[in-house]
Amino acid sequence: MSRGLMNKGKLGVAGNASAVVLGVAVLAAVAGPRLAPDNPTLPNLQIAWVGPMAGHLLGFDFEGRDVLSRLLAGAQSSMLGPLVVVALAMAGGAVFALTAAWRRGATDAVISSGLDVLFAFPGILLAVLATTVFGAGLTAAAVALAIAYLPYVARVLRSGALRERNQPYVQALEVQGVSVTRICLRHVLPNMSRIFVAQATVLFGYAMVDLAAISFLGLGVQPPAANWGVMISENEPGILQGYPLPALAAGVCVVAVVIAVNVLGERLLDKAVR
Amino acid sequence: MLAGSLLVASFVIFGALYLAPGSALAALSGGRALPAASIAILDQRYHLNAPFLAQYWYWLDNAVHGNLGISITLRENVSTLIGNRIWTTAGLVLYASLIICVLGIGLGVLAGLRPGWLDTSALVTTAVTAAIPSFVASIVLLLVFAVKLGWFPALATGGGGFRTDVKTFTLPAVALALSSLAIVARVTRAAIREEADKEHVQTAISRGIPPRQVISRHILRNAAIPITTVSAITVASLIAVSAVVETAFSMNGIGAYLVQAAQSKDLAVVQGISLVLVTAFVVVNLLADVLYAVLDPRVKLGTKAS
């Protein structure tokens, strides 16, 4: 990852701009609540829908809260949620892919057909089911999305793992009596790191959109907690009433991060395939 | 394969909601205390004391016969409730699919066949639109075309003749189609470009075959397989995303109803709609497989297209 990102000039203008956008978003996710100039959850209905002014660059939302503060505070759940989804899906996908590639035969067949059934469940539907059972919230939705993404991740990683499995270095290590776990963790996975990172980056964009959609539907992060998806849904009435800025600002945040992630993911994928 | 996936999927749907906390009896009674006689009747009618697998079997048997149980909030047949709303969702998804197939594939073919400014601008535009989620597209379209320009109604209630329906469904359908349209256009362009660079196309051109025929018989025909794949995947994905667009436009479809039911823990409705959505998803994928066999004589039905 660091090598891929630090290679200046190779990313191009779009790549550099994407890196900047992502850097700002990560900074907001880490330090957002402390950077927020105002209290992001304390309502003041007297200044609801008031437009931008000095000190409040994006104005106030439907409950009179500073929109910029809410965007900064909302960065945390908006960025951390997808990160958890990606981590879970990649870890689970790697375990399934490596097991299938190593055992092959019946184990591979069982894993592959089990994952095929999961294909029938769109991510959002699985998340809705999970929130029905466990109650609305980010955790249930994130775990459900990770499970829905598993087949896609496992399929890509499995073909990579099969390719590594047939390399002479793996046979050499096996002859030396190195344990399977150690071969996988210390040798095979590091060799797959490029495709791994590229896949994770692309997945982050999908996870961000799906999780924001779930929060938009009212099944993810619960108000008054700040979150970009929640902000779009709670400020949607403003669109019809002539105060579109709060909802649009949150929408721009989601789109900017997703574009940045897609651009970087595409570059990384090009390098991984080459 | 189709029946197998559906059976496992129905088991997952039933099993997941069976695990939901709270007793089924409390859900049926609405939390009221019931006399022992009523409890006995409910136990018998809903097989509440039967083992899990037996309950699954009763549910599945009923579902296959069109009986999806009773909504605990509206006290009506789930099948009727779904039936009242399913055409909104079906219309929305079909309209969006049409937009994707016509504009997405059209744009991709144009950009693929004509390198230059059209291609470059299509690449940049689609890179941006591919990243616009349906709920963001919804609010932007509402703002521009319903509030500022007033061309389309802001609330898509439907039910006023075909022309009115087309008008009310246009903004939601575009919102639903937008990001998929961009993805389909990009994949189509790449497929056309790859096919156009192949030797058989060069040979056809050098043999003096008219460009029109080269495009239709050599390029489009061969590029059709990846284009069908991506179109089918994106159209299938619309089925779930329609819930988001229906909610954004306050439409009365089964997607928005699923979300309401999930919030009010109306389990029978969640089960019923999930089953309908998963079935639709699997059927669209099956249709894509049939289409492969039509497009590519090498593909036999029942085997996976590679």
Image (cartoon, rainbow, N blue to C red):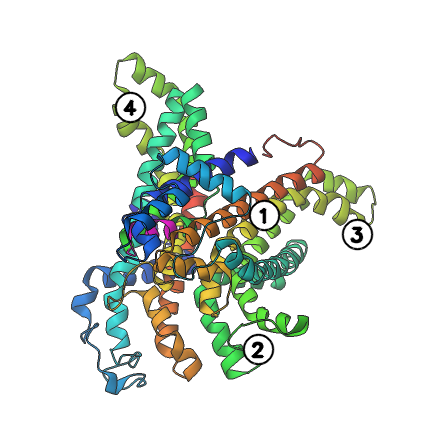
Disc 2 and disc 3: Cα gap in Å?
39 Å
Q: Which mark is residue B232?
A: 1
Separation of marks 2 and 1 at Cα, in angstroms: 29 Å
A204, A120: nearer the viewer:
A120
Q: Which residue is mark 3?
A: B212
Q: CA distance from mark 1 to mark 4?
A: 39 Å
In primary-sequence order, the first of circles 2 and 3 is: 2
Label disc, if present, on residue A233 of the rendered structure:
none
Chain at tag 2: B
Q: Are marks 1 and 4 in contact (CB under 8 Å)?
A: no
* Disc 4 target residue: A183
Where residue A78 appears, x then y in whole percent? 30, 60
Give the residue type that dot 4 points to.
Ile
Task: Tell me whether circle 2 and circle 3 mark residues in contact (CB < 8 Å).
Answer: no
Q: Nearer the viewer, mark 1 or mark 4?
A: 1
Chain of the residue that carries numbered disc 4 in the rendered image: A
Could you tell me which residue is drawn at 28 percent across and 75 percent down?
A: A67
Label placed on residue B152: 2
